[in-house]
Image (cartoon, coloured by chain):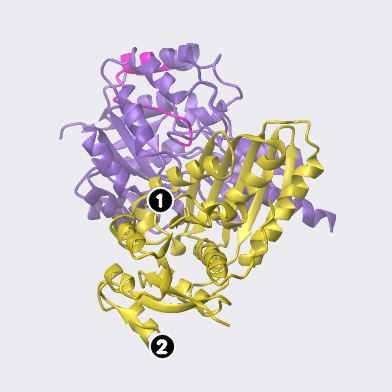
Amino acid sequence: MSEQHIHVVDTTLRDGSHAVRHSFDREQVAAIAGGLDRCGVEFIELSHGDGLGGSSYTYGFSKVDELELLKAAAEHVKNARLTVLLLPGIGTIERLKEASDCGASAVRVATHITEADVSAQHIAAAKDLGMFVVGFLMLAHMSEPEAIAEEALKMESYGADYVNIADSAGYLLPEGVKLRIEALKRALRIPIGFHAHNNLSLAVANSLAAIDAGAAYIDATLCGLGAGAGNTQLEVLAGVLQRKGCETGLDFYGLMDMARDVMPPIMQRPQVIDTGSLMLGYSGVYSSFLLHVYNAAERFKLEPRDIMMELGRRKMIGGQEDMIVDVSYQLSQNRKH
Amino acid sequence: MDRIKAGIIGPGNIGADLMYKVFRSKYLEMGMMAGIVESEGIRRARSMGVKTSTLGAAAITGERDIKIVFEATSAAAHLNNAPLLREAGQIAIDLTPAAVGPYCVPCVNLNALSHEPNINMVTCGGQATIPIVYAVSRVAGAEYAEIVACISSRSAGPGTRANMDEFTETTSRAIEVVGGAERGKAIIVLNPADPPLMMTNTVIVRVKDRSVPADRITASIGEIVAEIQKYVPGYKLRVPPIIEGEKVTTIIEVQGQGDFLPPYSGNLDIINSAAVAAAERLAANLLGIPGEEPSK
């Protein structure tokens, strides 16, 4: 039997953007994107953490505009596909065209796990631009396997080249990942991908569960840099997949060197599972909320985990960072009474 | 008292809710509900004693006593219908993204539009948030304004879903043109929670003049909220203005009146209520009744 090929999608410069509060500059991007390209990474995702057009009060302003960063990356990327994320409702087709002009040749169009139909227009427009297009379903723990398959089928029908599900809250256990990927495998003709968060220390294990269930595309980031407790750690994944006998085309030693030499000066905080990240995974809250919750906890003098539990109870989804202020305000009012 | 006859093109959910609001109006009465095919909406209107037609705009323009027409179809349909309505001397109140005429947010700029043959009602999120942007910009200026509208998935129809960019782009533009911000940004999120969430909107404005006292900004917002509540009773502040330096954050909730659509459809209620409020003012003008001046 030939080795199973796994396509690795690096999202250090997109999901990792949350962990550095969207402060990447051109030099950092050039070093990371150039290095990843040399290490054989197939897809390098770069945009504001909340996707194209995400720079805002609500999600945090980018220090350097993502289009400038795309141009900086494009100069150093020879083989990989420069990829952007787009959430309909935040980013627009107009912005996607600009990103394409700056060198992006792939886009992941992301919606909440139950709302695939809002991606039809953007997937079609991306195909018209000649891009490689991925349907990206977020907060996969909030829906059941068969219902997820129905949403994924819609994205397939719109023209997606593969469909990715994201455990955006880092909530799923390996069994939950397996059931979801298997349901997609049964329903779809196109390949399946998986994006993990490490809030319950399961990112690598869940990625393996996804591969065993039939996923062919796996997301990862250098040093695990990403929202919440971060993502699947790329250099670890490279080693693990080599041990497992999967073919990735990745330079394991080169990635370890990047993690050791390039990343530490860029990172603003250790990428660990602190109480806040653990609570995200435990209560099923979108990982990007973490640093915004810390800000609000300080501003309203609250315990971060109380805010997270309430966000989870209210079933807030990706993009609703504004509701962190709402929840914090209501909690602080209740305390007064 | 005399009432002005209104027509509605588009007998879907929006059209039906508009019809119920017209029934409640002091100055308006239903002249016709028009669609292009026999439908549940047409039958509903007929069963309530409203004249109906399946010949669309052509039927409405043939009714000489209809003076005001709500367009609750699609942008493409309104682009076709707008010239016909204009030729027939009927005022068009456009609830589609076509935006043939100027944007109207009643509590902000209705007075300036009273002679326009065609006004556009922006978007649901625009009706909910632009008044707040305006309330800040009129006292302290607005360098930048950003809004996040969250609506229940169940309240987002196929038109909205198929064209999210239309919402974000139209709302952003109207934040600038009507709200008075130098730069506008709009974000929309559809939340599938069950039971459905009420429509919530966050408005964040970066003021130009930081020397304006916080209580003046808060008072200006309070005044505009009272204005909106006259036509949208379910409009309320969830989080009163939080002012941190140049940044003003306000969160509002819109509960619908439940005329035809459920209360969680505050997004549809507010755009329909705004459309009817605009129509009532125009009708009052036609009837020679002096309207109360909205606060400026």
User: Label 2: few (<14), some or many (≥20) within 10 Å?
Assistant: few
State the quadrant of the C terminus of chain A: bottom right
Q: Quadrant of residue A266?
A: top right
> Where are the magenta residues, as a range?
A32-50
Q: Which residue is mark 2?
A: B49
Is A220 or A59 nearer to us in this picture?
Answer: A59
Rendered position, A131 above or below B134 = above
Amino acid type shown at disc 2: Gly
Is A177 or B91 nearer to us in this picture?
Answer: B91
Rendered position, A102 above or below B83 = above
* Image marks 2 and 1: residues in contact by CB distance under 8 Å: no
Q: Quadrant of residue A37?
A: top left
State the quadrant of the N terminus of chain A: top left
Point 45% across, 41% down: residue: A90
Rendered position, B25 above or below A227 = below
Amino acid type shown at disc 1: Ala
Horizontal side, residue B214 vs residue B96: left or right: right
As helix, strand or loop, the secondary structure at mark 1 comes to loop
Q: Which chain is purple?
A: A
Q: Which residue is mark 1?
A: B99
- Expressed as whole percent of the image width and height from the top left, the position of residue A42 reads 29, 25
As helix, strand or loop, the secondary structure at mark 2 comes to loop
Of pointers 2 and 1, the one earlier in the residue sequence: 2
User: Label 1: few (<14), some or many (≥20) within 10 Å?
Assistant: many
Horizontal side, residue B165 vs residue B204: left or right: left
Residue A200 shows up from this direction = no
Task: Name the subunit of mark 1.
Answer: B
- Expressed as whole percent of the image width and height from the top left, the position of residue B65 reads 40, 76
Whole-angstrom CA distance, mark 2 to mark 1, is 31 Å
- Expressed as whole percent of the image width and height from the top left, the position of residue B156 reads 43, 60
Q: Colour of chain B?
A: yellow
Magenta stretch encompasses residue A38: yes
